[in-house]
Amino acid sequence: MKISEMKELLCAEILCGEELENSEVNYGFGSDLMSDVLAYVNGRTVLLTGLINTQVIRTAEMADLTAIIFVRGKKPEQDLINLAMENNIVLMLTKDTMYTASGKLYSSGLQGIQIDC
């Protein structure tokens, strides 16, 4: 799914990375636990989270995430946005809850990360 499609589905605002709107994302993952992101995610994934600290960007950088969507209308400080720009990570903001945003993306064809039982 293209980032531009996610933007439309979630009525999201792009905070940085507009030039990457046509980039493809293969998976979605929702979490506020960055340890889970590091354990289960790698590459071409969008992270949905309510955390708005720089640790989110550092984790995204390590996991090679394409984009981050901040849920519940949480807007990060400019230093976090600048850090994302330095790392070519798209940041978006939606007013949807994590559950609702995840459901919209999943029902529109974005796959979730498979975690073995």
Image (cartoon, rainbow, N blue to C red):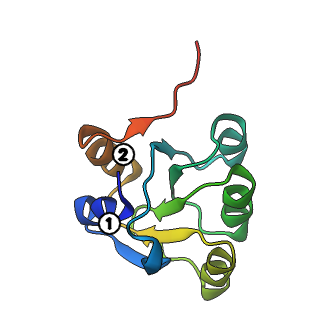
Residue 69: image x %, image y %? 46, 62
Q: Amino acid at mark 1?
A: Ser
**Residue placed at 39% from the left, 70% from the top?**
21
Quarter of the rendering containing residue 51? bottom right
Dot 1: few (<14), some (14–19), or many (≥20) neighbours within 10 Å?
Answer: some
Q: Between residues 2 and 10, which one lies in front from this camera angle?
A: 2
Farthest residue, direction bottom: 78
**Residue placed at 45% from the left, 51% from the top?**
25
Where does label 1 land, which residue?
A: 4
As measured in the structure, the alpha-carbon distance from the residue carrying label 1 to the one carrying label 2 is 16 Å
Task: Please tell me the numbered disc located at residue 105.
Answer: none
Where does label 2 land, which residue?
A: 102
Farthest residue, direction top: 117
Q: Amino acid at mark 2?
A: Ser
CB under 8 Å between discs 1 and 2: no
Residue 45: image x %, image y %? 53, 48
**Residue placed at 45% from the left, 44% from the top?**
26
